Amino acid sequence: GQNIDQPTEMTATEGAIVQINCTYQTSGFNGLFWYQQHAGEAPTFLSYNVLDGLEEKGRFSSFLSRSKGYSYLLLKELQMKDSASYLCAVRDRAGGGNKLTFGTGTQLKVEL
Amino acid sequence: DAMVIQNPRYQVTQFGKPVTLSCSQTLNHNVMYWYQQKSSQAPKLLFHYYDKDFNNEADTPDNFQSRRPNTSFCFLDIRSPGLGDAAMYLCATSRGGNSNQPQHFGDGTRLSIL
């Protein structure tokens, strides 16, 4: 099975930088995804990592260390609209490599 | 421009009365998924189709069934909904294989049980 851990809640200030961590345990790691989910809406894709290192996409960056089972999502220049839940999801080779296991999400609150 | 479309957005049914949720996609993706998400919890995979091959999760209750009549459509049937089945149901699609392409989600159907 898989075990994914993320902090439950975080609070940050508009314009600041925030880092959301995710640790995971899986036997057949095959990629890690970050999704953003606003309340009552569907998750939307933010980033993907399968090799170690940093992937940057505008204000959002994601980092992966496979040896440590660790990833983080970095959000820069925070805006009020960034208040949402951020879900870490791990793909495993089992079952044809098509399935994702999601963490419970980190609820980010951006304040003035 | 919606690529994964779920109908209806909100569904109310009575305890024990069968209900069907629908999902369609314009992406021509091989794989379609159904997730259940309860408040403040992670989306939980119920099952998925890879083309016509059905893959059930071991802990998905028998009360939940699915049909995929063609590439574009997938249905979630709940045969006898209980109060514990009230949740958001999310449909997602993806390309098959070990791809870096993400799963694309529909807007979800929020199911209430009276």
Image (cartoon, rainbow, N blue to C red):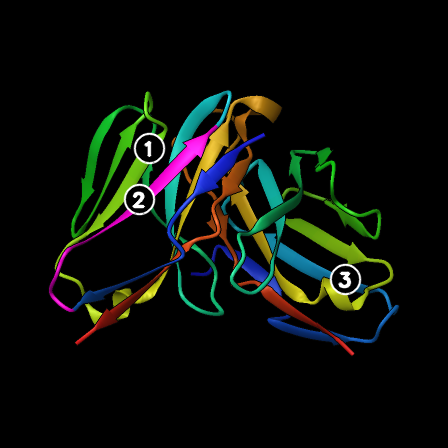
Numbered label attached to residue A70:
1
Residue indicated by mark 3: B20
Neighbours of disc 2 within 10 Å: few (<14), some (14-19), many (20+): some
Residue plotted at (24% across, 69% down): A110
Name the N-terminal-most of marks 1 and 2: 2
- The rendered magenta stretch, by its main secondary structure, is classed as strand
* Badge 1 vs badge 2, beta-carbon distance below 8 Å: yes
Q: Is residue B99 visible?
A: no
Residue B73: % across, % down: 66, 50
Q: Are marks 2 and 3 in contact (CB under 8 Å)?
A: no
Front position in the image: A21 or B28? A21
**Labels 1 and 2 share a subunit:** yes
Q: Amino acid at mark 1?
A: Tyr
Helix, strand or loop at label 1? It is strand
Q: What residue is pinned by disc 2?
A: A21
- In whole angstroms, how far apart are the C-alphas of marks 2 and 3? 37 Å
